[in-house]
Image (tube, rainbow, N blue to C red):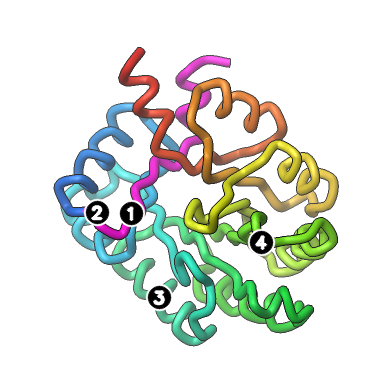
Amino acid sequence: MTIQEILKKVDHTLLKQTSTWEQIKVVCDDAIRFNTASVCIPPSFVAKAKREYGEKLNICTVIGFPNGYNTTAVKVFEARQAIKDGANEIDMVINMGWVQEGDYDSVLEEIRQIRAATEGKILKVIVETCFLMQEQKIKLCEIVTLSGADFIKTSTGFGGGGATREDIELFSRHIGKNVKMKAAGGIKSIQDAEDFINLGCERLGTSSIVKAVKEL
């Protein structure tokens, strides 16, 4: 697998709370330079990035991030606003409290509402695997498949744990044929990236791969 093939699956990411426009701009410039799949940045920077880069940049952003316990109405508004500002891809965080209660109907309904608000754009559903038991992970594969979302995504990177090879293997056995996988959190090396791609991931959320390529 070539470096270029890996980079084409990377959502080059900067979501730190202290991120500044100057830092975001570096990430955007690198995403264009290295031809990554997208740049994943905070919602407050989407409109500025769109004005600055136009169609040269595929912009991804996050909603309900990182905790997921915003109301559904707020998440729907966030998604619509992000698309209006210029985002082409939305990574949403599910309500993990509902999962712990076993209220999967509410989880599904929320994703469906956000799917309706983002129609025509890519929607990735972050399930935050570090908080889940195996049976919950399997159930969420079913929920994401039923919702019509494009991707199931492992992690925010803020929950205390990131993507694992075991979780991706589990996802691959339980998601529907129209659902793709995104691994995020803890992908630090080119070897990590290659491993996750070989396991079936179509996207990787990471800031480390471009840095590794720069060092090469």
Q: Secondary structure at mark 4?
A: helix
176 horizontally vs 59: left or right: right
In space, the residues marked 4 and 2 are separated at their CA atoms by 26 Å
Q: Which residue is mark 4?
A: 131
N-terminal of the pair, mark 4 or mark 2, is 2
* Residue at 51% over, 26% down: 6
Q: Secondary structure at mark 3?
A: helix
* Residue at 82% over, 58% down: 138
Q: Which residue is mark 1?
A: 16
Which segment did they paint magenta? 1-19
What type is the residue that disc 1 sits on? Lys
In space, the residues marked 2 and 1 are separated at their CA atoms by 5 Å
Q: Secondary structure at mark 2?
A: loop
Position of the C terminus by quadrant = top left
Q: Residues within 10 Å of mark 3 (few under 14, many from 20)?
A: many
Q: Which residue is mark 3?
A: 78
> Relative to 140, is 55 above or below?
above
Q: Are marks 4 and 3 in contact (CB under 8 Å)?
A: no
N-terminal of the pair, mark 1 or mark 4, is 1
Q: Residue 89 in the image: state x and y as whole percent.
A: 46, 56
Q: Are marks 2 and 1 in contact (CB under 8 Å)?
A: yes
Q: Is residue 132 magenta?
A: no
Q: Is residue 8 magenta?
A: yes
